[in-house]
Amino acid sequence: MFIQLLTSIFFVLILPFFFLIIIKTSKSKKLSTAPSPFPKSYPIIGSYFDIKSNRSNRLQWTTQILQSSPSATFTLNHLFGYRQIFTSNPANVQHILKTHFFNYQKGHFFISSLFDFLGNGIFNVDGESWKFQRQISSHEFNTKSLRKFVETVVDAELHDRLIPMFSDAAPGKTVLDLQDILQRFAFDNVCKIAFGFDPACLLPSLPQAQFAEAFEEATILSSERFRAPLFISWQIKRFFNVGSEKRLKIAVSQVRDLAKKIVGEKKQELGDKSSLESVDLLSRFLSSGHSDENFVTDIAGPRICLGKEMAFLQMKRVVAGVIRRFKVVSAVEDGFQPEFVAYLTSKMKGGFPIRVEERGELD
């Protein structure tokens, strides 16, 4: 209520100025009737109205603007002079992400928005801290033993859970949400690879796992911070522990409490033995001497992405294992247009309904 009151007072005071600016700008552009793909920008408020009207389809909207831009780059103006630069120009992308990567830090806005969820993990730090974690992770990801462990985990999840689920659904042509199933499949794998912990999300009953739900909730609410009209608005809600920030605090607490519980158990096991028998990432980090609970929790995961090569390995084995046995047929209605939803992870709104059919010998 306090935040809404402040917001209302703010807009009431400056609304007349906004309308004056908009009217004058509209009159000056009256002769230009051709619609522009680029968002209109005004003093003080920037492109607030276009941003708000495209809130639900922001990724598609910015993609269309980039496609219309001769340089495949444009600047989006927010309230009070805050700006975002979008680019899909290959030369710019290579410059930012490869040749001059260290010149483009994540910055305070990005880091503070995700800190409650990601902490000081590799996805949320800059400079020497990023470099140090990158070196540690690269060393582990390039070991043959970890690759073999990933293959074993993925194959077990594929043959013990995913394929039996498809086999049960095929005879009755049961409609399945492929997006939800693959998300559960990925979450099980990530938790087992990162922590050696099996949340068992991909069981036949499709259980509502508290850990997975808390992780998804934290992902969505952390992403929402970037969409707040004012950077300070979510900080005020966090200070008073209300609304979405209260829910985020609860979700993050559930995720990190379980993660620290697993870390504590493995540290206890390491103290009782000379080494850990498991070969998950957390065990590897602890065995190599990294014993700080916050550090290993942030660096080990759980992560939705375990690196490009590991992600490709999972994708290849899953696709090969499923396509060899089944036909996957879309169960959406004719004329259905998928709506893309972008958070820290991306998905299709409403899921992806499918049916599976057993392949015959001649298929």
Image: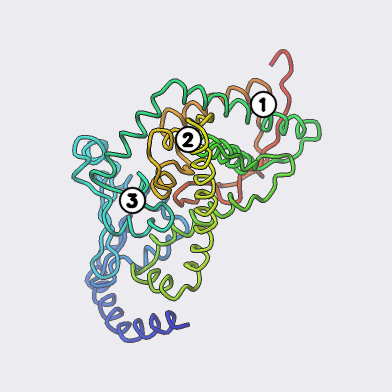
Q: Which residue is mark 3?
A: 65
Q: Is residue 142 left or right of residue 23?
A: right
In front here: 315 or 146?
146
Q: Is residue 341 left or right of residue 128?
A: right
C-beta proximity under 8 Å, tags 2 and 1: no
Q: Quadrant of residue 204?
A: top right
User: Which residue is pictured at 27% across the width and 65% down the height?
Assistant: 41
Q: Looking at numbered disc 2 in the image, what kind of residue is underneath it? A: Ser
Residue 311 at what x, y percent from top left?
47, 31
- Quadrant (top left/top right/bottom left/bottom right) for the C terminus: top right
Residue 325 at what x, y percent from top left?
68, 22
Q: Secondary structure at mark 2?
A: helix
Q: Residues within 10 Å of mark 2 (few under 14, many from 20)?
A: many
Q: Which residue is mark 2?
A: 283
- Rendered image: mark on residue 159: 1
Q: Secondary structure at mark 1?
A: helix
Q: Secondary structure at mark 3?
A: helix
User: Which residue is pictured at 73% across the width and 14% down the height?
Assistant: 361
Disc 2 or disc 1, which is closer to the eye?
Answer: 2
User: Which residue is pictured at 46% across the width and 52% down the height?
Assistant: 343
Residue 39 vs 132, above or below: the answer is below
Residue 95 vs 152, above or below: the answer is below
Disc 1 or disc 3, which is closer to the eye?
Answer: 1
User: Which residue is pictured at 25% across the width and 73% down the height?
Assistant: 44
Q: Residues within 10 Å of mark 3 (few under 14, many from 20)?
A: some
Q: Is residue 158 left or right of residue 2?
A: right
Q: Looking at numbered disc 1 in the image, what kind of residue is underneath it? A: His
Question: How many badges with numbers are in the image?
Answer: 3
